[in-house]
Amino acid sequence: MRMVDLIQRKRDGQTLSADEINFIINGYTDGIIPDYQMSAFAMAVYFKDMSDQERADLTMAMVESGEKIDLSNIFGIKVDKHSTGGVGDTTTLVLGPLVASVGVPVAKMSGRGLGHTGGTIDKLEAVPGFTVEITNEEFVKLVNQNKIAVIGQSGNLTPADKKLYALRDVTATVNTIPLIASSIMSKKIAAGADAIVLDVKTGAGAFMKNLDEAKELAQAMVDIGNNVNRKTMAVISDMSQPLGFAIGNALEVKEAIDTLKGEGPKDLEELCLTLGSYMVYLANKADTLEAARNMLEEVIRNGNALETFKTFLRAQGGDDSVVDDPSKLPQAQYKIELPAKEDGYVSSIVADSIGTAAMILGAGRATKESTIDLAVGLVLNKKIGDSVKKGDSLVTIHSNQEDVEQIKEKIYSAIQIESNKVKSPILIYDTITATT
């Protein structure tokens, strides 16, 4: 078997076998196949696509390239959730305790963030004392005991994907459905999930700006999951504006607490109930999505979801009293209101620009070496469709620096106000299940 022959076959639109794909991935991971040949292969895939079976085989080849997490000692069906990212995406902080409180095991492996705000681990570390530095044995024990635990990502999951992604990044082959889908799904499968719920974002603040492309990616990932015996479903959700109100680590923890109390932003609550319903359904804890949703609404009402969050924080060293007193979370020195310059209705909020403003404040990392300020960030006081009077606060800036003129200008340029009434955007566009 020669790499040049496989490149040629894919260039000509032919289908590769599982053995041939394994040859490519193993050879590249081991350093036998050079970057220039893998670049040619990635470009051939970019132009010629892959069949459903090829996509599944590529995914599993990347899974097999490194360590796999064994969750077999955790009781029940382990359902993982993956979001394709966005601004103010606090869903994991809410979903974990929410679905755990109805008996679905949440064994979450998370990382640190690079971009607008920190990742799930950074956000949780805004809780004093909280740590993800636990052994695998302790991780399994906590999930069995409390139905939820979070651990840091292993360094050796899907090394083939890490190497291939770095190459795609410098060869203009990032944005191709089979390579995106196999990259995401290989990490979820290697992390030990039995079933997977995907939240695929679309809009200005999402990787997939276009709805049709988001649907294509979602379908590709769902089909990969089901082809390799992982029950998989996807939701296409809006990221034309930030989700919820808060963008920033401690601020998002507080918003998650509010949402678990039933007092959070309606869009964040609705998305969490939708995703959570699929997680409960795939875990066989409910016979229908409606029954699953009813269970989740009940644990918010009776306080069990909030208690599960407290138990989770406490079990990993966190000060669970922040749930009752969020002022114990890191607090910014300055709270600066951004007043509207005119009357009207908010017609657009460019999520990417709002996220960049939060990052400049220190809520996220511009590079891996950047230090996050867990206290800072932005809280939106108006969303698309809301009426505004001149002087009303559009955004509260939580800052540890007094001079925020650059931030203000960035936010003003991201929020458009029109005189005519504007409808709020659709939150959930579609649900994707396996191709029949």
Image (cartoon, grey):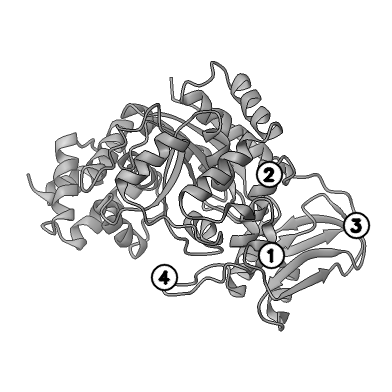
Residue pictured at 76% horizontal, 70% vertical: 412
Pick whichever of labels 3 and 4 is earlier in the sequence. Answer: 4
* SS category of the residue bearing label 1: strand
Name the amino acid type tagged 1: Leu
Mark 2 and mark 1 in contact? Answer it, CB < 8 Å: no
- Circle number at residue 66: none
Q: Nearer the viewer, mark 2 or mark 4?
A: 2
Residue at horizontal 56%, vertical 39%?
308
Quadrant of the drawing holding the N terminus: top left
Instruction: Name the secondary structure under disc 3.
Output: loop
Q: Position of residue 25 (x, y in %)?
A: 19, 48
Give the residue number, with chain letter if any, for mark 4. 368
What amino acid is at disc 4?
Lys
Q: CA distance from mark 2 to mark 1?
A: 17 Å
Furthest residue toward top: 287
State which tag comes first along the sequence, 4 or 1: 4
In x, y percent, where is residue 361? 62, 74
Q: How busy is the neighbourhood of tag 4: few (under 14 within 10 Å), some, or many (20 plus)? A: few
Q: Is residue 46 left or right of residue 4?
A: right
The answer for how far apart the CA atoms under marks 1 and 3 are is: 25 Å
Q: Label 1 belongs to which residue?
A: 378
Q: Give the spatial CA distance, label 4 vs label 1.
A: 22 Å
User: What is the three-letter code of the residue carrying label 3?
Assistant: Ser
User: Judging from the image, what secondary structure is the residue with disc 2 in?
Assistant: helix
Q: Choose mark 2 or mark 1, whichever is in front.
A: 2
> In front here: 265 or 58?
265
Which label number is shown at residue 259? 2
Give the x, y percent position of residue 101.
55, 33
In percent of width and height, residue 103 lies at 50, 28
Between residue 313 and residue 381, name the one nearer to us. Answer: 313
What is the tally of numbered marks visible in this picture? 4
Q: Which residue is mark 3?
A: 419
